[in-house]
Every structure is written in C-alpha cells, then in structure tokens.
Image: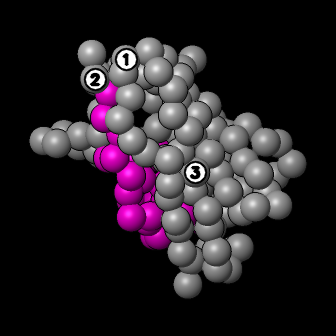
Amino acid sequence: QVQLVESGGGSVQAGGSLRLSCTASGPTSERRCVGWFRQAPGKEREGIGTKYTDTFTSAGIVLLDSVRGRFTISQDAAKNTVYLQMNNLKPEDTAMYYCAAGTYCSDSYRAFGYWGQGTQVTVSS
C-alpha cells in the first residue's frame, strides 16, 4: 500500500515562496509517477505537474500554464520525496494542494490511485 505524506503548506504574502514536500512509501511499482494537484473552494481540481520517480532526471514537468515559470517540481530519490517549489505566489494560488501517486503520469487526477492528505496554501495580497 502506497502512503504519501505532505508537508510545507502555510500562509504567505503575495510574492513569497513555499516548498511543499511529498514523501512516499510502499511498492515503488505503484508510485512510478508522483503528481501535484490543487483545488480551491468551488473549483475543480487542477493538475499542476508530474514527476516520474524512476528516472535519473531530477526535474519534473509543470503542466499548468498559470504556474509555469513560477513553480518547479524536483525529487530527492534517496529520501523518496518529491518537491513542489512555489515562487512569486499570487492570491489566486490559494488552494488545498495534494500530491498523488500512480503507475503512469497524467494531467488527470483520475490516473492516480493514491493521495496525500493535502496541505493548505493561503496567499494574501
């Protein structure tokens, strides 16, 4: 059973930065891909980006246009941890952020069978 533990959320002023962590455990074959998603109240869940965990490249792929250039995804394989670095945060980035794991990467949350508990990010203007 794959388990995901997130940390790093909080409150920050616009222009600030936060780094979210997602530490995974369990069968590696079931968590080949780690994705980051977010959901604001009253809105649909958005796919932010993904990272294959079994590659030598440390950088993930950011899929969401509104955060590209501000958010990056990276990995520390030795710690089984995938990071979401968020810079130049804006009030519209306020949401609950989730990491998820699955056997392949997709921008659709339906492809991911395992989810973390979520961590709140609040950006004030």
Residue at 79%, 42% in the rendered image: 58
The image's colouring method is: one colour
Confirm whether residue 93 shows in the render.
no
Residue at 62%, 67% in the rendered image: 24
First in residue order: circle 1 vs circle 2: 1
Report the side of 124 relative to 31 (left or right). left
The x and y percentages for residue 98 are: 42, 53
Residues packed near mark 1 inside 10 Å, few (<14), some (14 to 19) or many (20 plus): some
Q: Amino acid at mark 1?
A: Ala
- Compared to residue 52, the image places residue 11 above or below, namely above
| CA–CA distance in space, label 3 to label 2 | 21 Å
Confirm whether residue 82 shows in the render.
yes
Q: Which numbered dot is residue 99? A: none
Q: Quadrant of residue 121?
A: top left
Residue at 72%, 62% in the rendered image: 80
Q: Circle 2 is placed at which residue position? A: 124
Residue at 23%, 40% in the rendered image: 40
- State which region is magenta: 96-123
First in residue order: circle 3 vs circle 2: 3
Q: Which numbered dot is residue 21? A: 3
| CA–CA distance in space, label 1 to label 3 | 20 Å
Q: Amino acid at mark 2?
A: Ser
Magenta span includes 124: no
The x and y percentages for residue 85 are: 58, 34
| CA–CA distance in space, label 1 to label 2 | 6 Å
Report the side of 43 relative to 7 (left or right). left
The x and y percentages for residue 84 are: 57, 40
Magenta span includes 104: yes
Q: Which numbered dot is residue 14? A: 1
Observer-nearest of 44 and 91: 91
Observer-nearest of 45 and 123: 123
